[in-house]
Amino acid sequence: MILSSYAHAVGQLRDPRFRRVIWFGVALAVALLFAMYALVLLVVQIFVPGTLTLPIAGEVSGLQTLLSIGSLLVMLGLSVFLMVPVASAFTGIFLEDVANAVERVHYPGLPAPTPVPFTTAMTDSLRYFGLLVALNLLGMVVFVVSGGLGFVVFWGINAWLLAREYFTLVALRRHTAAEARALQQRHRWRLWFAGMWMAVPLSIPFINLLMPVVGAAAFTHMYHRVQGRKPGSSRVA
């Protein structure tokens, strides 16, 4: 079920209906990464004298780094930690478009969903965004002191939070808030494992730019699969 959901999600990246979402999603991801990267540099300049060596990203010396030649490489390194909050912010903006595109292709004949109000989606996304920023900045420190073993812990935490957020927002399109939460709780361990398949690629530069779109599509499939529907039909399997 999980591998099939991701396979269908990746396979639909060529769908013309996905292209606008993909390009906007990548542009948003880069913009948010750049903004958070600038924030990290500002914190370094204010609180850390001289230079600071971050895992993967290397030396960061302050805001002057923002416009340096090596800035892109530093930002890609930081994306290992910062793409998870970016993916969280993504849900409130593009999840509805992705879910609609998936359902038109793979689950025809379903009644039209009730769109999640933008304020509800953004409130839910922002609730997780701050937590995920803090966790992943802490993950940088844990990575350094643990020799990389901290990644396993933070993949697990990120997987849980992302799965809960993505699945619940998809479910809210066809259920009340109480029903969506109950459905998420009923399948929480399966969804957590599905979240791992999103959290790990979010740590891989370049691939992580596509993962918010892939994740939204995959969790749309996961929602329908736990409801007993197979791709290609709206009928219950």
Image (spheres, rainbow, N blue to C red):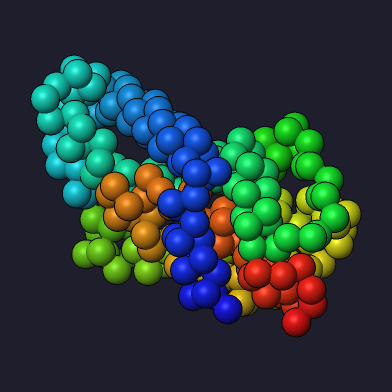
Q: Is residue 226 left or right of residue 207?
A: right
Of 199 and 45, nearer the camera is 199
Of 1 and 13, nearer the camera is 13
Image quadrant in which the C terminus is located? bottom right
The percent coordinates of residue 220 (x first, y second) are 64, 60
Vertical placement of 74 versus 49: above or below? Answer: below
The percent coordinates of residue 216 (x first, y second) are 57, 53
Q: Quadrant of residue 227?
A: bottom right
Q: Quadrant of residue 36?
A: top left
| Residue 219 visible in the displayed image | yes
The percent coordinates of residue 70 (x first, y second) are 12, 30
Residue found at the far bottom of this picture: 237
Vertical placement of 151 versus 230: above or below? Answer: above
Q: Residue at x 39, y 54 (%)?
A: 202
Vertical placement of 166 versus 75: above or below? Answer: below
Q: Residue at x 72, y 70 (%)?
A: 233
Q: Quadrant of residue 217?
A: bottom right
State how many labels appear: 0
Of 165 and 217, nearer the camera is 217
The percent coordinates of residue 60 (x first, y second) are 18, 32
Q: Residue at x 61, y 36 (%)?
A: 93
Of 197 and 130, nearer the camera is 197
Q: Is residue 123 left or right of residue 130?
A: right
Q: Residue at x 50, y 36 (%)?
A: 20
| Residue 225 visible in the displayed image | no
Image quadrant in which the N terminus is located? bottom right
Q: Is residue 109 left or right of residue 4?
A: right
